[in-house]
Amino acid sequence: MSFQRRMEENMKLATVEDTVEYRLFLIPDEPRDPEKHKETLQKYIERIMTQFAPMLVPYIWQNQPFNLKYKPGKGGVPAHMFGMTKFGDNIEDEWFIVYIVKQITKEFPELVARIEDNDGEFLLIEAADFLPKWLDPDNSANRVFFYHGELCIIPAPMKPGAVSWLPSKPPTIPQALNIISTHPENVLASESIQAAVNRRIRGYPEKLQASLHRAHCFLPAGIAAVLKQRPRLVAAGVQAFYLRDPIDLRACRIFKTFLPETRIMTSVTFTKCLYAQLMQQRFMPDRRSGYQLPPPSHPQYRAHELGMKLAHGFEILCSKCSPHFSDSKKSPVTTSPLWAGFLDSLKKNDYFKGLIEGSTQYQERLEMAKNYFQLSVNRPEGSLAMNPGEEILTLLQTLPFDFEELKKEEANLSPEDDDQWLDVSPDQLDQLLQEAAGKKEPEPLSKEDEHYDLTQVSKSMKAFISKVSTHKGAELPREPSETPITFDADSFLNYFDKILGPRPHESDSDDQDEEEFECLDSDDDLDFETQEPGEEASVKGTLDDLKSYMAQMDRELAHTSIGKSFATQKQMESLSQTTSNNSDEEHTGAGGSVMTPVDVDLNLVSNILESYSSQAGLAGPASNLLQSMGVQLPDNTDHRPTSKPTKD
């Protein structure tokens, strides 16, 4: 299966367990002392996580955050820094990681990065329309890397041994690292491939703010206090509700942790993906839970509904924890020797946004930084992080919050964001799909272009038919400069005539001996330049008989519904005449005796237009096929019913 076919399949499929893996290698990599090499890589991890903390700390991940850990060498793969993130339904998490990895190799030029997901080389899948012909999933292993902030693809030699520094087979990781370090200018991906990948990560890190959505929620005070300290926990709450099962809902029949009578109005920050997941779920709470919704006409109905759903998610998380779980997994943060340097790095990168030290907002951001430091920077090897439910219960036990103070904050809530982006029109959806595929939206037709040249449709279809097709699929005519495949009609007829044999009077018999087809076994028999005069006359007679049979068949079909359904060249001429009398004479008089050839181009275009019209503006086979070949049909402004041929 080609990368282009994988790209098409990935647009249809998505799984909750989608994961992305990333590896960072140090070059030149000469680990003479494994322990010193391990220490070096661990220092790189600390530097990377500290330098990129201003971006990573406030980000809300769908399932798992960006992370790095030391991975020892194994199976020919040298020791390196490794990370794996489950991004689930939020594909933006994956592309944010691509941006981070790309920036890491730019900030640390001695590092080479490799990134792939459960689909394999997803960067190549993204750039499937621009890949060289030789590159396919079978030979792409260990060829795609980031180096100096640029995408690199290690080429394959045209012939084994043609280039001394290129292996004839897919390279191993050590070979790839050596090639990249010694021939960096020869492994850079083409500009079109680079542009396809850069298009997906364009706008970061400013794009992070655009991915957030702030909404008012009527929540229990405990959840509001927890989210102030750990905004990222909103993802765990939404996922718990979104992926709930009947067993989970048993804990929500009667709430034990987040009582409905403690609810207050607060502002919650979601990612757009999390907000959409919460909004699209239809759910009515159990009557015994105490959560009741106002009528839909209530001005704050949406805030009540969001709060109810989120409260169910948090209750499910806490219900899965033992009430007497151990708190030994948590260690002091500020006592770590790395904390001071980490905090200085945050201040230098304006993480606190000029907030006064000691203020409420400053403390909130400081707590977020401590939590990030605990999870990503100062996490001991082999230690187990608390699950979200344990973290929530720990915060409830140790976090002092004033219910009355939270109640007073209701009057000063920041306005919530507009969620009109949820209501996407078909035109907007088409535009988004075009942008995701890397295609520009076609410009609307001007008045000068009202007379659309439909010959472009027939030319594109003919070009498509002439392309090579295999069991893997057919190639679309993308490059006009490509030489089309030619078809020698005369040679084909000569072969066809010879296959019929020299006895035309037996050509309509089904009882033919095997000797008649022996000519197929020898190429010499197909050399028509050596035919005797008698054989040429026999072949000519056979061809004349075949033409007469075909003509008789055409005459018989012309008077049937099938024959009348095809437009002929004479019918086209009659449409250009101003009077209808001449047209009637052609069909009733001469039409019965004089056969007119079928207009192939007209029938092709008219059938495609009829199919396009029946799509009623939606996606369909006609528009999809033509758009893939670069042909954009104008909107159908003729809303008259399509005429169909009448039955005899």
Image (cartoon, helix red, strand yellow):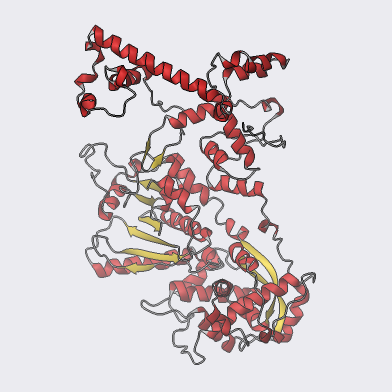
Where the C terminus falls, by quadrant?
top right
Q: Position of residue 570 (x, y in %)?
A: 60, 17
Q: Can the viewer see residue 83 in this picture?
A: yes
Identify the image quadrant of residue 419.
Answer: bottom right
Q: Residue 444 placed where, x, y %?
A: 67, 35
In depth, the one of 340 and 318 nearer the eye is 318
Please name whichever residue, 11 or 533, is drawn nearer the observer in this view of the structure.
Answer: 533
Position of residue 301 relative to residue 19, above or below, is below
Write the residue at 76% across / 73% down: 412
**Residue shown at 71%/86% (left/top)?**
261
Could you tell whether 301 is left or right of 284 in the image? Answer: right
Instruction: Please tell me whether residue 71 is drawn above or below residue 629 in the rendered image.
Output: below
Placement of 537 over or under 61, stated as above or below: above
Residue at 51% across, 72% down: 343
Q: Image check: 464 left or right of 503?
A: right
Q: For this rendering, which residue is in front, 167 or 544?
A: 544
As drawn, is 261 to the left or to the right of 77?
right
Q: Is residue 150 visible?
A: no
Instruction: Tell me how many marks there are.
Output: 0
Image coords of residue 429 (percent x, y):
62, 49
- Residue placed farthest to the bottom in the image? 324
x and y percent of residue 451 in the render?
67, 25
Q: Quadrant of residue 394?
A: bottom right
